[in-house]
Image (cartoon, coloured by chain):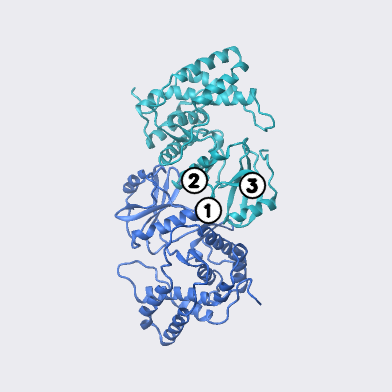
Chain colours: A cyan, B blue
Amino acid sequence: MSVFTPVPQPVLADWLRRYAIGRLVELKGISAGVQNSNFFVTTTLGRYVLTLFEDMPRAELPYYLHLMAHLARHGLPVPAPIADRDNEYLGTLQERPAALVRRLAGASEMAPGVEHCTHVGAMLAGLHLAGQSYGRRQDNPRGPAWRAATGAEVRDFLAVDERAMLDDELAFQAAVDLEALPAGPIHADLFRDNVLWEDGRIGGVIDFYFAGHDAWLFDVAVTVNDWCSHDDGRLDAARVAALLAAYHAERPFTAAEQAAWPAMLRAAALRFWLSRAADFHLPRAGEMVLVKNPDEYRDILRLRRGAVPPLPGAPA
Amino acid sequence: MSVFTPVPQPVLADWLRRYAIGRLVELKGISAGVQNSNFFVTTTLGRYVLTLFEDMPRAELPYYLHLMAHLARHGLPVPAPIADRDNEYLGTLQERPAALVRRLAGASEMAPGVEHCTHVGAMLAGLHLAGQSYGRRQDNPRGPAWRAATGAEVRDFLAVDERAMLDDELAFQAAVDLEALPAGPIHADLFRDNVLWEDGRIGGVIDFYFAGHDAWLFDVAVTVNDWCSHDDGRLDAARVAALLAAYHAERPFTAAEQAAWPAMLRAAALRFWLSRAADFHLPRAGEMVLVKNPDEYRDILRLRRGAVPPLPGAPA
């Protein structure tokens, strides 16, 4: 249960008076999520999600909240943050930074098919295109520097063959030229559990708290690695083709991206192998972290270091 | 059918490229509405309503669009306008000012009960409270000056007793002191057909194109006259009490409002009697206006000139 900070009903009822969304009807903790305390909040005027930020620096939160607001304003189904009567998105509740966002409908699809991947590819391109006019900038918190640093932290815990692959991969990635790739705000964590489906359509893209400025192609790679992989990590050719074609139709890939694609799939696999290995080998005290098996992304990285399908539009 | 300006599918598909909401899937004219051309637009990423403004001056449209955006940002279920990739809400399509807004779910309730009136009262207070921080100002286009001018235009078409009531009412209203009443952006047309219900809750408040700056109490009066009246125009005491109590709980009425309440109910009745009489007696050429019977609001005005129930919080 990811409610680290309880919120008594009368405390919330009082706090909601800073908003114009009516009276508290129901408050319910949400079990998903491993970083923050989340609640479903129903008022007389609507349904919202309340988040208390447990560890994230307050100064970094406006980037995420305004990004969500920006994307929602551009018509994308992301949770729009709710402004209080002073026009602020970020408040304080139980001594934590706190924000309300609109609750979106739908449920995750953990066994996606080709159709789902088509929708996800189009949506991801929409997010990138709409993000172009976003005025704030914050680097991807799990970007190249983080990957190098975290690699150094976890390598001593790895088996010999894993360590060899890690060293080789970090050296390979350090030589990739990222400057040529178009960049902007990316979601950076568009896994199956962060997309809500309703009647076969995307009703919501949630959890923007890993977002940051980085190569768009890195976001595509994170997404393909999750949505288009079989259980053993092998890519499913039909799903890959569907996702990439839908993305390409909205935002055509550049020649530089075509060249960088195999490296980006590896970088995206590396990023999740490293974060899971760090959570596994270096758990932080006192946190109720749902530890995911790092082996899944170790295997995906190993596979992506082999041949991968090209991007659409690449020279044959 | 209120589609004055047709929009061919390929034209729209091309126009949508300025947005980040994917590809056109379906385009369908909407029969409701009498002023503008409206369409349901479904894309690969969501469901929207497209409006082509037929008569409204382009310079006045940002007030409405930004007001809707402001209220949506504050968590109220109003149709949020969609920004294009240049961050603009207002575009041009088929040589008309045009805007996309998010499509809301639900259906109108034309036989509201006490529960509905409770929700509507709370929602209206929420709109007024959230509107306090809205930065733009445009006067209520159907305010006191319009009522006086329109009264002069239609009086010659009225029966003798109607004309006497109109003259008396205009004289009475001219003497009402509006300065003492708290004011802000008001919806000004919150009739039953402009509220969408979903599972007994308000899923949407639509049609902000009569909004403007005016006394909040005028908005309450417009709303009570529609939601709380029997077919013959008499007020239903239970519905009036429910709507006003719910509003009062969010935004307590002031002493000045308690004093002005009977006059505001009359002003609100007058406003709709006059617009319907004008549409009936002075139809504008070439328009497909759904002409509503002016007698309904003539009768409501006549009844409101008698005794009306007081606002909550008034001295006994």
The subunit letter for the residue under badge 1 reads B
Q: Amino acid at mark 3?
A: Leu
**In this figure, which residue is indicated by the disc labeled 2?**
A69
The subunit letter for the residue under badge 3 reads A
Tell me if I can see residue B117 in this picture.
yes
Tell me if I can see residue A232 in this picture.
no
**In this figure, which residue is indicated by the disc labeled 3?**
A93
Q: CA distance from mark 1 to mark 2?
A: 11 Å
Image mark count:
3
Name which residue lies at 70% across and 49% down.
A8
- Tag 1, which secondary structure? loop
Name which residue lies at 41% across and 23% down.
A177
The subunit letter for the residue under badge 2 reads A
Callout 1: few (<14), some (14-19), or many (20+) C-alpha neighbours within 10 Å? many
Indicate which label's residue lies in the foreground, 3 or 2. 3
Question: Residue B71, position in %: x, y?
Answer: 50, 55
Is A261 left, or right, of A148 in this rendering? left
B175 is higher (above) or lower (below) than B48: below
**In this figure, which residue is indicated by the disc labeled 1?**
B74
Is B238 left, or right, of A309 in this rendering? right
Question: Residue B270, position in %: x, y?
Answer: 46, 76
Q: CA distance from mark 3 to mark 2?
A: 21 Å
